[in-house]
Amino acid sequence: MVVVTYTRTECGVDFKNHDITLAVLNMEDIIHGHPKNFQINLGFQYEEDYLYCEDMRVCDLLNLKDVSSPVYVYSKKQIEANINKYKTAMKNSGRNIQLSYSVKANMNPSILELMRNHGLFLTLVSGHELRLALDLGQEPGKIVFNGNGKMNWEVDLACRSGVLLNVDSIFNMRQTIDVCKAGGYVANVLFRINPDINPNVHGYVSTGQEGSKFGISADELEEVLEMATTFEKIRVVGLHCHIGSTIREPEKFKQSTRVLVDLFNKLRSRFPDLYVLNLGGGLSIPYKSQISLPQKCKQVVQCEIDKNDDQEIARLYDNLLTSKLTLSTFLEAIKPLPRGKEIFLKLQEQVPSECLVPEPNDLLSSISDIIPPEAKVILEPGRSLVGNSAILLSRVLGTKLSKKKNFIVIDGAMTEVIRPCLYGAYHHVELAEPSRAAHLQNASDQSKLVWDVVGPVCESADFIGKDRLLFTPHEGCSIAVFDTGAYCSSMGSNYNMRVRPAELLVDGEKVKVIRRSETFEDMMKLYTNYYCFSQ
Ligand code: LLP
């Protein structure tokens, strides 16, 4: 793979020596909640109305050779901080846990390599993801292969390579036995259980309720167990469940873990090789972490600061007001402080729940007591490892004003961020540089307007954000769609013959192109033998 690396100076921009000191990026301290380390947001932060990704001013990235808008911009430090949160939580849990990244969230090989360099393994859902994992040198015995409908070649590759295969149904068990017979393989299998739990998420990302297409239901379980017992080439090593995605209640994980542990204890005498409990992924991220603090909350915080003259909270609050801290990071930062807890509890009731999402530590502390110490646990998160690590950086094409609706039309679209249109999901949108239009009018916050931010795709479902309060942007103004590291690039499409964008990985003041933009020729090469182009 060709990787192009740029440094900050190659952007041709005279960077001011902004005092966002990166010395605060001490991961261990951040994870342990040391308040001094909450001076800035890790990956993305604003400084004088310009958005930075680590050391790079993001609007300057659009001037790089071979980079055009829209483009995904990833922060390496943010991914590393996310990994470290899991690692610390795993250490604290006292259990034997394998952390496996769910490739479907984002399959960029450079991201997979980063995961591997930090000791993570991979969970997959297709034969091609498996081929990629094997090509990247992943240890097959640590790979988990999921899926409610696998093709014979996929099961064959999985059994031949010796990966852990999640059996999802009676027909999948039969298929696995047939493949093992034909190839002379022994398959290491986990049973994916449907525990019938409502995870309280959008119906499209709920996967462990009765009536879901995933997992073995209570009705089919005995028959699957019987088949596995009868055929000696099936080695039953574990149980698996994944009840859904964007889960915000640790209690849901507790419920599903209980179901799995009960079954684990019941089946151990029948299957002596049983040792793995795969608890799936599904932890959400605070998609509303960037929203501003509601006015009435501001009064609460100011009043507490004045009353107690609390310098630490005052400093954090100042960073929040100047957009150096997101609301979520601010709330996380004040929680462990002596007077902070009280303020936190007052604000918690008044901010949307998408601001405050449980962390890996909350997840593991809610379940570690019920996990048998001799079991090996697998966690397979996707979103919570990469979701907040990227923005989609776009340019404003123009604005439209009318009595009923105002539109900001950008060059990014549902083809790059399909989640709002598919699940009604919230992705924060913010200008990535000061609006020249706003500047001319000497704008204050009051001069912001309410906009729908939409793309150019010929479809009314093509919206990125609705009813967003933003300054009127100038044409060409760069604009950021936040939290696009998971399920955005990987769910991208060529609809309207749009090319899929490039992806950049920022590491301090270095920028790597980790995926080039697609071209017209890339799209057409699949048709060239079947269609005569006129000369
Ligand atoms: N394990 C299994 C078996 C899964 O099916 C999934 C995701 C994961 C792990 C990782 O879940 P995560 O930690 O990323 O929530 N396109 C949707 C998400 C679909 C996720 C499906 N399964 C979205 O954009 O929200």
Image (tube, rainbow, N blue to C red):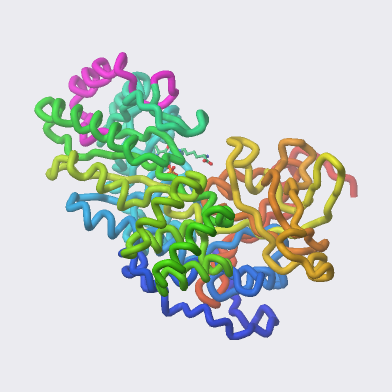
Q: Position of residue 70 (x, y in %)?
A: 70, 57
Which portion, as a residue range, is magenta?
210-239
Q: Is residue 88 above or below residue 162?
A: below
In magenta segment, residue 442: no
Residue plotted at (31% across, 49% down): 362
Q: Across the whole image, how many numbered discs are drawn on residues? A: 0
State the residue lying farthest toward the left.
269
State the residue lying farthest toward the front.
307
Q: Nearer the viewer, residue 462 or 191?
A: 462
Q: Position of residue 254 (x, y in %)?
A: 28, 36
Q: Is residue 196 above or below residue 325?
A: above
Q: Is residue 235 above or below residue 84?
A: above
Give residue 298's quadrant in the image: bottom right
Q: Position of residue 380 (x, y in %)?
A: 36, 45
In magenta segment, residue 216: yes
Q: Is residue 165 above or below residue 347?
A: above
Image quarter where ligand 1 lies: top left
Residue plotted at (42% across, 39% down): 247
- Left or right: residue 458 versus residue 25 is right
- Left or right: residue 42 versus residue 518 is left
Residue plotted at (65% across, 43% down): 493
- Left or right: residue 179 versus residue 129 is left
Quadrant of the drawing holding the N terminus = bottom right
Give residue 478's quadrant in the image: bottom right
Q: Nearer the viewer, residue 173 or 99?
A: 99
Whether residue 515 is visible, yes or no, is yes
Q: Nearer the viewer, residue 441 or 149?
A: 441
Q: Nearer the viewer, residue 108 or 453?
A: 453
Residue plotted at (85% across, 45% down): 533
Whether residue 524 is visible, yes or no, is no
Q: Position of residue 457 (x, y in %)?
A: 77, 43
